[in-house]
Image (tube, grey):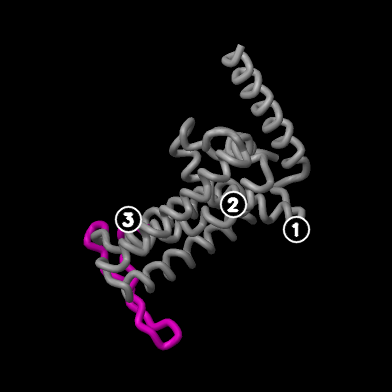
């Protein structure tokens, strides 16, 4: 049974899906969304610790890793909790990926140092965002979701592509009938958008 309000997965997925119905655009987002999240965490590694919380220092594969409980950690935590609340199974996998991204980005950031890290992040972000805008302009032929709902587009993007991959490769759905109901809402949204677009051209 679906949830309502802030954790209404059908509503969130239908909103994002209406802007990502072209298969090629979906593939492009699958390739670029998580690297955007990863590199955002990488640069946020250099933000100060929240509430003067002590760092977590441990060894990984013989290498010392220092995890800072800063804005990067807070972002990964918020995303993780939100995804689990949306759907426990897929959300737990997404939360695991968020945790892995936080640890791995922290390790890489500590090795690169800020002077090199920001350049790597800038190049990666430009490449990934360019790819996504090409996906929308060339294949989807519809402006990105972030132009209509910035917060929802940014928060839902990593979970959307993960859920899309789980559905495509493993036939997963949060509950029976989920994808049929979402697809119906997506088609209705696209039809409404096309009608508005047509009226503007008349």
Does 119 appear in magenta?
no
**In the rendered structure, which segment of residues is drawn in magenta?**
50-73
Q: Quadrant of the N terminus?
A: top right
Residue 167, image x and y in percent?
Answer: 72, 52
Residue 182 vs 75, above or below: the answer is above
Picture quarter containing residue 76? bottom left
- Check disc 3: other Cα within 10 Å, few if <14, some if 14-19, many if 20+: some
- Check disc 2: other Cα within 10 Å, few if <14, some if 14-19, many if 20+: some
Dot 2 or dot 3: first in sequence order is 2
Residue under the image location 32 percent in, 58 percent down: 44
Which residue was labeled with disc 1?
Answer: 170
Q: Is residue 10 or residue 4 the one in the foreground?
A: 10
Q: How many marks?
A: 3
Q: Which mark is residue 28?
A: 2
Q: Is residue 61 or residue 17 the one in the foreground?
A: 17
Cα separation between marks 2 and 3: 28 Å
Whether residue 24 can be seen here: yes
Residue under the image location 73 percent in, 31 percent down: 184
């Amino acid at each position: 049974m679906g949830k309502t309000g802030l954790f209404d997965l059908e509503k969130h997925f239908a909103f994002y899906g209406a802007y990502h119905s072209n298969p090629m655009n979906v593939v492009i987002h699958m390739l670029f969304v998580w690297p955007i999240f990863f590199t955002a965490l990488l640069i946020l590694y250099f933000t100060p610790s929240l509430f003067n919380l002590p760092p977590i220092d441990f060894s990984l594969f013989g290498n010392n890793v220092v995890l800072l409980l800063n804005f990067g950690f807070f972002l990964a935590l918020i995303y993780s909790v939100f995804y689990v609340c949306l759907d426990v199974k897929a959300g737990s996998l997404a939360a695991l990926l968020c945790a892995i991204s936080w640890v791995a980005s922290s390790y890489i950031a500590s090795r690169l140092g800020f002077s090199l890290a920001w350049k790597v992040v800038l190049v990666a972000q430009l490449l990934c965002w360019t790819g996504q805008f090409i996906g929308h302009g060339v294949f989807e032929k519809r402006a990105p979701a972030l132009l209509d709902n910035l917060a929802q587009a940014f928060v839902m993007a990593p979970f959307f592509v993960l859920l899309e991959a789980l559905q495509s490769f493993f036939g997963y759905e949060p509950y029976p009938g989920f994808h049929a109901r979402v697809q119906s809402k997506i088609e209705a949204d696209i039809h409404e958008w096309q009608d508005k677009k047509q009226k503007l051209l008349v």
